[in-house]
Amino acid sequence: MAIKAEDLRIGNLLYFPFHKEVVEVVGLPLLPDGKQGVQVKTQGTILCEEFLEQFNPIPLTEEWLGGKLKFIRDKSRVQWIKDGIRICLTPENRFVYPDAAHDYVYIDFVHELQNLFKQLTKNELTIK
């Protein structure tokens, strides 16, 4: 799936197949040829700048929610909570955020959850 630049912000996590690792977005420049670029920091703090299409979104999984992002799974085994934000797993195995208007915001990728978390809490959601 292609990532859109307007869906990204500084601090988002993406997968960089070339380095075979998760990277953090530190900039979103337009490159000299007019294409959208992404400046990233690898876990080894190497900075690089590449075309946006060279990155993949990270699918949101139970491992990411409960492991790397430190959401706590409740007794129902279908909800994860962190800082008052509740993420639910639907019977179709999709993650959703049920908002106050009883609408569902579907969350398929880690960067989408990061953006929602930041919007709701004003705090960054990072790997711990």
Image: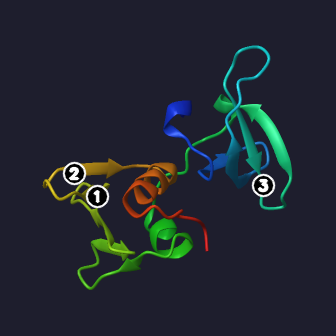
Mark 1 sits on what residue?
97
How far across and how far down the image is residue 44, in percent? 84, 61
Q: Position of residue 118 (x, y in %)?
A: 46, 57
Query: Looking at numbered disc 2 in the image, what kind of residue is underneath it?
Result: Tyr
The single residue placed furthest to the bottom in the displayed view is 75
Q: Earlier in the sequence, mark 2 or mark 1?
A: 1
Q: Is residue 16 left or right of residue 120?
A: right
The residue that mark 3 highlights is: 42
Question: In front: 1, or 111?
Answer: 111
Secondary structure, mark 3, is: loop
- Which residue is labeled 2 in the image? 104
The crowding category of the residue bearing disc 1, from other C-alpha atoms within 10 Å (few below 14, some 14 to 19, many at least 20), is some
- Looking at the rendered image, the quarter that the C terminus falls into is bottom right
Q: Residue at x 78, y 42 (%)?
A: 18
- Residue type indicated by callout 3: Thr
The answer to whether mark 2 and mark 1 are in CB contact below 8 A is yes
Instruction: Identify the residue shown where x is 74% and y is 46%.
Output: 40
Ranked by sequence position, the earlier of labels 1 and 3 is: 3
Q: How is the image coloured?
A: rainbow
Q: Amino acid at mark 1?
A: Tyr
Q: Earlier in the sequence, mark 3 or mark 2?
A: 3
Helix, strand or loop at disc 1?
strand
Crowdedness near tag 2: few (<14), some (14–19) or many (≥20) residues, C-alpha within 10 Å: few
Mark seen at residue 52: none
Residue at the left extreme? 102
Judge whether 67 appears above or below 121 on screen.
below
Separation of residues labelled 1 and 3 (CA atoms): 29 Å
| Position of residue 99 measured from the top left corner of the image (x, y, whole percent) | 22, 57
Residue at far top of view = 33
Q: Report the residue at 66% width, 31% height from top.
A: 52
